[in-house]
Image (cartoon, coloured by chain):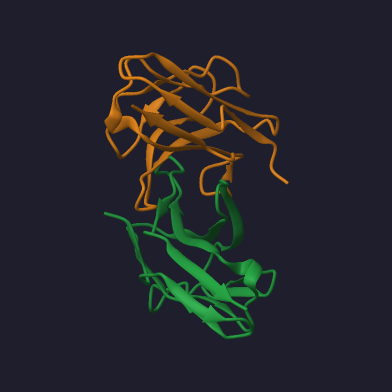
Chain colours: A green, B orange
């Protein structure tokens, strides 16, 4: 079945450090890929998405590129801030499968000043 | 900003009570979803709907039920709450399959 595997957390970084959170997927169809972020006590917010191979999603300094050859969608940011502390979820959805999102297990990021 | 709302945000109740978690959206989306988020953070789909009078069970078995009488409203009901139902429940909606899903703020349910 379809699945998403994320790098395990928690990840602790100092402010202005480089961030990478790895995400790989398996899918029977052609998925759309997403990164969602969850701040403490809140629901999920879409961070970025990509719908076809080689697409790059970007938002708020975060980037991820849809790599079909390696079935990956790694999240990167060049310089993290304390306000980026949150839980990050990689997810996929495949058309004609009810539209359900399949999530990775989440990666908790903590950024220290 | 997404216009999807959930009430209550927090609920603490005793075992055996009937509860309804409300979810409404003002975006006119046909597709709506309920996810359960366990304390380990993982999210699992428990119900979804393609539109009015359409409801389907998701991947994770749940004792809850849902209804979709109006496009904008997708409530979830537990007839008899148990401690095993303690979790966070997140509602979401989208325009089409494979489109971005917009999430509500969630309801954190604790059953004593």
Image-based side of B56 in relation to B97, left or right: left
Eyeballing the image, is B91 above or below B53? below
Image-quadrant location for residue A63: bottom right
Q: Image height check: is B100 above or below A52? A: above
Judging depth in this view, the residue of A33 and B40 nearest the camera is B40
Count of labels in the image: 0
Question: What residue is shown at x 45% (from left), y 58% (from top)?
Answer: A91
Q: Quadrant of residue A100?
A: top left
Residue A33: image location, x then y, percent: 49, 61
Quarter of the image that includes the C terminus of chain A? bottom right
Q: Is residue A103 above or below residue B89?
A: below
B18 left or right, relative to B5: left
Residue B69 horizontal/vertical position (percent): 54, 14
Q: Nearer the viewer, residue B87 or A34?
A: B87
Quarter-of-image position of residue B61: top left
The residue positioned 58% from the left and 86% from the top of the image is: A17
Query: Closer to the camera, A109 or A74?
Result: A109
Quick one: quadrant of the N terminus of chain A?
bottom left
Residue A23 coordinates in the image, percent (x, y) = 41, 71
Q: Is residue A61 left or right of residue A93?
A: right
Q: Residue at x 56, y 74 (%)?
A: A111
Kindly identify the residue that appears in the image at 48 percent across and 76 percent down: A12
Q: Is residue B18 left or right of residue A61?
A: left
């Amino acid at each position: 079945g379809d699945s998403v595997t994320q790098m395990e957390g928690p990840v602790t970084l100092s402010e202005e450090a480089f961030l990478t959170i790895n995400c790989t997927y398996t899918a029977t169809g052609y998925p759309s890929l997403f990164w969602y972020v969850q701040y403490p006590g809140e629901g999920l917010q879409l961070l970025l998405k990509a719908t076809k191979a080689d697409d790059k999603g970007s938002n708020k300094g975060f980037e991820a590129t849809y790599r079909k050859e390696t079935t990956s969608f790694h999240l990167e940011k060049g310089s993290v801030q304390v306000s980026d502390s949150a839980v990050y979820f990689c997810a996929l959805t495949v058309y004609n499968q009810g539209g359900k999102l399949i999530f990775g297990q989440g990666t908790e990021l903590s950024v220290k000043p | 900003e997404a216009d999807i709302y959930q009430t209550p945000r927090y609920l603490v109740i005793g075992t055996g009570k009937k509860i309804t978690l409300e979810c409404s959206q003002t975006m006119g989306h046909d597709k709506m979803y309920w996810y359960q988020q366990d304390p380990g953070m993982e999210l699992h789909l428990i119900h979804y709907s393609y539109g009015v009078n359409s409801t389907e069970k998701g991947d994770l078995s749940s004792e809850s039920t849902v209804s979709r009488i109006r496009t904008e409203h997708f409530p979830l009901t537990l007839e008899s709450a148990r401690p095993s139902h303690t979790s966070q429940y997140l509602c979401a909606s989208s325009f089409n399959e494979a489109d971005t899903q917009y999430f509500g703020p969630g309801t954190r349910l604790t059953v004593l």
